[in-house]
Image (cartoon, rainbow, N blue to C red):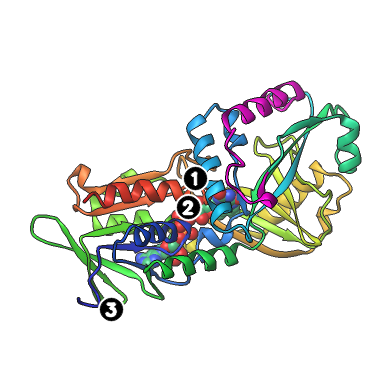
């Protein structure tokens, strides 16, 4: 067997590429993953660490995403129980829109009814109790800085979180290597190779040629540019980028629970998660124009986020806090120059519009749902 001949080549060592590589190798495919920099160095390194359990999707009645999030977050917990843990979340409730006690009580009931299998075959330490609605006094006791005026109560539920993201990526890579995945870091995909009929035959990457009849482009925010190079007419099928960032700030967490709060100015909730003796705050979305490599979080946006936190939680001291680190990445958005995010993964089989046969490109929207996205990618790319 030739060293550079594979059944599948995956481009990109983020959570999507790694999960695709793992599942392909476990299915018995001879699989190569190439990453131009280092594993988990793209948007995957900038995530906020929540494996969403699905509650957030109930407000727009997106049952498919609810179920995918539940099943996939549970997959991570079962596969890496020592790296995933439940964390309580508290959302103070006022008399605003859907975020009222009566609505949240109903949401918790639906959450239970649609997820009776949430704790199925998970280790004891990973089991999450049902969500509930607390009184205003209870919220004030748990989170004393939360504004009291108009406070009606609070929603308390659990999400699975990953305190150490790089450790999860390393564990995933180790499991994938053990299943036979070959991983090469520092190797950049350059050109697609195909025969006269348009069937994919391989890839030129890092100055070498690799043979494979199936290529998965899982290059995250670089996927559209790469797809355009391999198949110029595909460029209109991808989503434009939105820049997102979080801050690790040097201030003790305002509560034992992670807080989901609003400063009343934006529709996005902001989250403050305990991270040891510090607070991890996220997530802010900014318009991104220009190529993915030019994305930078402006100083002014950091200051504006700290001011938002201070408005939401007066007295927390966010305005004069020191920022330990900024983590960021690009996500697929709805429109160039705006901050809305798409709510479905983009999965493109290029042969469907007459492009190269054997090439599939992906723009994934969540770390959480990488396992089900990976299964779908492989179903399309690897039909025997
Ligand atoms: C601030 C922020 C907070 C988030 N919080 C959460 C959260 O709490 N929960 C959640 O579920 N999701 C969250 N997300 C979303 C999640 O992080 C992303 O959806 C996910 O990490 C994207 O993974 P990916 O593998 O598609 O892309 P990436 O992680 O960007 O990986 C793509 C990889 O491809 C490589 N690459 C690019 N071009 C080439 C090439 N030519 N050759 C070889 N390699 C190449 C890049 O170097 C990169 O490593 C968050 C995202 C951000 C930015």
Q: Quadrant of residue 52?
A: top right
Please give the residue where the numbered disc 1 appears in the rendered image: 337
Residue under the point 57% across and 37% down: 117
Please give the residue where the numbered disc 2 appears in the rendered image: 289
| Secondary structure under the numbered disc 1 in the rendered image | loop
Disc 1 to disc 2: CB gap under 8 Å: yes
Q: x, y (%) of residue 361?
A: 33, 52
Magenta segment: 98-127
Q: CA distance from mark 3 to mark 1?
A: 35 Å
User: Comparing marks 2 and 3, which lies closer to the viewer?
Assistant: 3
Task: Give the camera-side residue of 138 and 364.
Answer: 138
**Is 142 placed left or right of 245 in the picture?**
right
Mark with earlier residue (2, 3): 3
Q: x, y (%) of residue 256?
A: 82, 50
Residue under the point 24% across and 75% down: 4
Mark with earlier residue (3, 1): 3
Mark with earlier residue (1, 2): 2
Magenta stretch contains residue 235: no
Q: Is residue 85 visible?
A: yes
**Is 305 placed left or right of 339 in the picture?**
right
Residue under the point 79% across and 64% down: 322
Q: x, y (%) of residue 88?
A: 74, 45
Please give the residue where the numbered disc 3 appears in the rendered image: 207
């Amino acid at each position: 067997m030739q060293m550079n001949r594979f059944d599948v080549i995956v481009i990109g060592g983020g959570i999507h590429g790694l999960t695709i590589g793992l599942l392909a190798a476990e299915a018995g495919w001879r699989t190569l993953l190439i990453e131009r920099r280092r594993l988990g160095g793209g948007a995957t390194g900038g995530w906020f660490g929540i494996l969403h359990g699905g509650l957030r999707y109930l407000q727009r009645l997106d049952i498919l995403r609810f179920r995918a999030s539940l099943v996939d977050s549970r997959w991570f917990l079962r596969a890496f129980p020592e790296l995933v843990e439940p964390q309580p979340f508290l959302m103070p409730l006022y008399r605003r829109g859907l975020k009222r006690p009566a609505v949240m009580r109903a949401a918790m009931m639906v959450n239970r009814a649609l997820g009776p299998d949430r704790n199925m075959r998970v280790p004891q330490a990973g089991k999450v109790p049902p969500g509930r609605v607390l009184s205003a006094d209870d919220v004030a006791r748990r989170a004393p800085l939360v504004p009291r005026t108009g406070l009606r109560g609070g929603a308390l539920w659990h999400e699975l979180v990953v305190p150490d993201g790089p450790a999860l990526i390393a564990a995933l890579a180790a499991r994938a290597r053990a299943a036979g995945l070959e991983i090469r870091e520092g190797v950049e995909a350059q050109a697609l190779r195909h025969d006269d009929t348009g069937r994919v035959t391989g890839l030129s990457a890092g100055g070498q040629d690799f043979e494979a009849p199936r290529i998965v482009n899982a290059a995250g925010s670089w996927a559209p540019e790469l797809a355009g190079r391999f198949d110029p007419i595909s460029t209109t099928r991808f989503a434009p980028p939105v820049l997102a960032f979080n801050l690790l700030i040097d201030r003790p967490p305002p509560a034992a629970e992670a807080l989901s709060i609003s400063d009343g100015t934006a529709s996005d909730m902001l989250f403050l998660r305990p991270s040891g003796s510090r607070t991890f705050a996220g997530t802010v979305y900014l318009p991104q124009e220009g190529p993915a490599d030019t994305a930078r979080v402006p100083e002014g946006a950091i200051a504006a986020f700290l001011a938002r936190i201070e408005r939401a939680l007066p007295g927390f001291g966010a305005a004069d806090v020191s920022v330990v680190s900024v983590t960021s990445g690009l996500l697929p958005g709805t429109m160039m120059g705006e901050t809305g995010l798409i709510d479905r993964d983009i999965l493109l089989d290029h042969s469907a519009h007459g492009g190269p046969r054997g090439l599939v490109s992906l723009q994934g929207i969540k770390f959480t749902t990488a396992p089900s996205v990976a299964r779908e990618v492989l179903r399309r790319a690897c039909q025997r």
